[in-house]
Amino acid sequence: MQTAHASRQTGGMTRDHPGPVSPGDIYEDCAFHPVLCTDTCDDEVRGISLIDATSPRSCSLTHCGVIKLTIAEVLEARADFPAYQARREQEIDTETPAAGPAGRDRLAR
């Protein structure tokens, strides 16, 4: 299922770009960090944050709501990460109201 999220910069929607996450891809982890994928194993994806270089950052592909990102989306997040993170939290809450705050498993970390 493809998910869409409003983007302030483009006025459009941030979309999950379907397909498997592989090393070299950029994905959004459950803390909303854009992450460069360095390894995958079964249900887990691991990488390095493109916000603060923390690693390893690991997420479950089935439980964390990982989405693939474009370079433009990474640049938007890096321009003002607190604002990007707040916007993404609001979008997830709007998408999944039954799941409560932060929708996915995102803020449990």
Image (cartoon, rainbow, N blue to C red):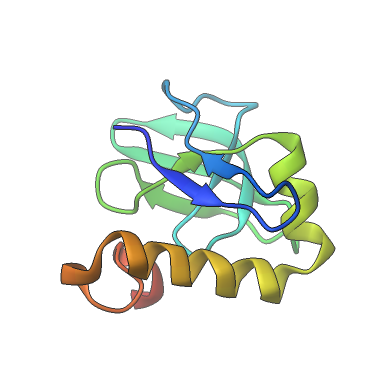
Q: Can you give x and y, in whole percent of width and height, for residue 1 in the image?
A: 28, 32
Residue nearest the viewer, comparing 12 with 41: 12
Q: Residue 70: where, in percent of width, then height?
A: 67, 34
39 sits to left or right of 73: left
Establish if 79 lies above or below 89.
above
Residue lying farthest to the left in this orientation = 98
The residue closer to the viewer here, 13 or 57, is: 13
Residue at 56% in and 44% down: 13
> In terms of image quadrants, where is residue 85?
bottom right
Which quarter of the image is occupied by the C terminus? bottom left
| Residue 25 screen position, x and y as percent | 61, 29
Query: For the view shown, which residue lies furthest in the right direction?
Result: 79
Q: Residue furthest front?
A: 11
Between 30 and 86, the residue placed more toward the observer is 86
Is residue 106 shown left or right of residue 75? left
Decide: is 33 above or below 46: below
**Vertical placement of residue 9 versus 20, above or below:** below
Q: Foreground: 76 or 58?
A: 76
